[in-house]
Image (cartoon, helix red, strand yellow):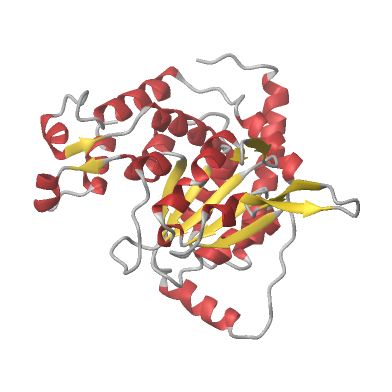
Amino acid sequence: MATRKSPSGLDTQLQDLHTKLDSARGEIAKRIFGQEAVIDQTLITLLAGGHTLLVGVPGLAKTLLVSTLGEVMGLSSRRIQCTPDLMPSDILGTEVLEEDDGGRKSFRFIEGPVFSQLLMADEINRASPRTQSALLQAMQERTVSVAGHTHLLPKPFHVLATQNPLEHEGTYPLPEAQLDRFMMEITVGYPEEHDEKAMIIATTSGKKTAVNAVFDGDALMAAQELLTQIPVGEKVVEGIVTLVRHARPETSPDKKVAESLAWGPGPRAGQTLLACARVSAALDGRPTPSLDDVAALAPAVLRHRMQPTFTARAEGVTVEDIIRHLVAKL
């Protein structure tokens, strides 16, 4: 098991963080009715230092969730509405030629909306592949390059993107490399009946619900650093490695799984599962993660990093089916 530094001090800090996270959950719940699993998984991604892809049909409060998170987490946020005619410069920024009073000309860089702590890319799969790719460097390296110059992005920097199901008209599938940059692909479903009733009443009353900031950028980064110190048992690490390797056609000992997959998750999936399992434990007030955390997070972490073969899809086999099969063996 990993070594713990000052167990009592770490436990106290984690208890304080758990209290703050409960407060953040409460603030978000003022506007988002139900969807507890979606809220928790989104918070887990932020606290693990990553990016989130929210997938669901229109009208399920994906955009409202992201804007509310920006307020509750105290982050400077900007929004991009992705459309087919959106250009990379509309996201990253551009250089303009200016002339001063003395007639001297120089280029000045005008920052795009990517220069924020929380960037919301709404309906990201309606943007062209070229524009989608413009986010790759920003998401991975926290920098952008324009006209041969590299610009650092603010800290922390997180992308929360929303996506319509691919079956909808006017959508472009995200490149595999960009999908892998998202820690989780979170499926947003319809609310329960009682939540939908409460939402309808609250949102038609004419009153806008205010939320309070529980974190700020520095507090979020401090929490991210603290969470990396949570110890993880050898059994959990072995379970993560086994799950990821068994999800690849090249290394899976399960012949049925191997024949059903065109490609599987890379090492980043294992890194993500370990980081998110730590956060999941802290969110529930537990000192260490368990295999239950891994099992609960596996669908969101793996589903966008795996692809069934054409034959498997023709037989009705889905990524979710394969993940459930693998998780059952943990």
Q: Is residue 170 left or right of residue 10?
A: left
Q: Residue at the spot x=24%, y=42% of the render?
A: 307
Q: Residue at the spot x=60%, y=40% of the render?
A: 144
Q: Residue furthest front?
A: 103
Q: Nearer the viewer, residue 158 or 130?
A: 130
Q: Residue furthest bottom?
A: 205
Q: Is residue 309 left or right of residue 173?
A: left
How far across and down, in percent of the image, does residue 80 sit?
57, 61
Q: Nearer the viewer, residue 52 or 141?
A: 141
Q: Residue at the spot x=47%, y=75% of the render?
A: 196
Q: Residue at the spot x=25%, y=46% of the render?
A: 319
Can the viewer see residue 101 in this picture? yes
Vertical comparison of 28 with 94: above or below:
below
Q: Nearer the viewer, residue 215 or 262?
A: 262
Quadrant for residue 147, please give it. Answer: top right
Q: Nearer the viewer, residue 179 or 48?
A: 179
Total tally of numbered discs in the picture: 0
How far across and down, in percent of the image, does residue 86 sit?
50, 61
How far across and down, in percent of the image, does residue 186 sit?
42, 52
Quadrant for residue 165, please give it. Answer: bottom left
How far across and down, in percent of the image, does residue 321 sit?
22, 46
Q: Which corner quadrant holds the C terminus?
A: top left
Can the viewer see residue 75 in this picture? no
Q: Is residue 211 left or right of residue 322?
A: right
